[in-house]
Amino acid sequence: MNRQEELLERFLRYAAVTSQSDPKATVVPSTPGQRKLAELLAAELRELGLVDVEVSDYSVVTGKLPSNLPAGRKAPCVGWCCHLDTVDVNLSPDIHPQVIRGYQGGDICLNAEKDLWIREAEHPEIKRYVGDDLVVSDGTSVLGADNKSAIANVMTALSIIKREGRPHGDICIAFVPDEEIGLRGAKKMDFSKFPVDFAYTIDCCELGEVVYETFNAGSATLKIRGVTAHPMSSKGVLVNPTLCAVDFINMLDRGATPECTAGTEGFIWVHAMTTNASQA
């Protein structure tokens, strides 16, 4: 099996494990599928010769590929970190990937029965991949490339390093759950088991892209409590929390939003709003 085939085989195997995270859950991991994937990866890491492989109570997987450098030679300890969960966007939690060999351009039919397509007019970026093999979903779910593709890359890289006997220092691995719902898994890491000099979080971005600054510095929740009153007797009494929220949003700088900024320009992203007659 060549590298490309190994990478694809691993991705399809990991994608088959349902591991959507659940923002409504109060435990970590938020879904049992993430534990299943964690145990699968831990077993594979052991097979690859990693040591100190553990799956914590929170389904954080850690392990180390010990240095194979000659005595007296040292190298920094490098960490590779990926998340186990896939995002929940109100589609099917079960992923049914399909491989398109030698993409020839044009629209991609994901699901003929449901008439689901990736339209080139809507996604012109697919033109860059003419001639490549593509992996897509059947349109009823996300593909799960975020972040199963990263996991497949890390596992394949470890396999190549071991198989080809490439020289390396210590390489530490961490797979964490519930990244998509607020980095909950990363907050449960025991960093004594990830003693790295520096680390890379492997996630899904453009091929060759390296991000060295965070795009999202913090978040805030604004709570508005209104004053309820019957419409027939609300004059001078009613305070509508929905309208207050809209007024607040309208005071924000419309030019300082993600769709109007680039590079290291700061932005404000109004993520969601939930309101009723008494609060927002």
Image: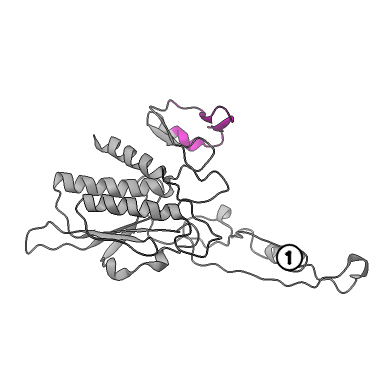
Residue 192 image offset from top left, x and y in percent: 28, 71
Residue type, label 1:
Asp
Q: Quadrant location of residue 144?
A: top left
Residue 189 screen position, x and y as percent: 36, 67
Looking at the image, the residue that sits furthest to the top is: 104
Render colour scheme? one colour
Residue at (54% x, 38% y) in the render: 140
Mark 1 lies on a secondary structure that is helix
Residue 259 appears at what percent x and percent y?
57, 52
Residue for badge 1: 247
The question of residue 228 being in magenta is answered with no
The answer, for residue 202, to whether it is visible in the render is: no
Please provide percent x and percent y for residue 105: 46, 27
Horizontal side of 198 relative to 179 (left or right) equals: left
Q: Is residue 69 left or right of residue 195?
A: left
Q: Quadrant of the N terminus?
A: top left
Instruction: Give above or below for 45 relative to 16.
Output: below
> Magenta segment, which residues?
104-127
Asked whether the viewer can see residue 100, the reply is yes
Residues packed near mark 1 inside 10 Å, few (<14), some (14 to 19) or many (20 plus): few
Camera-side residue of 241 and 115: 115
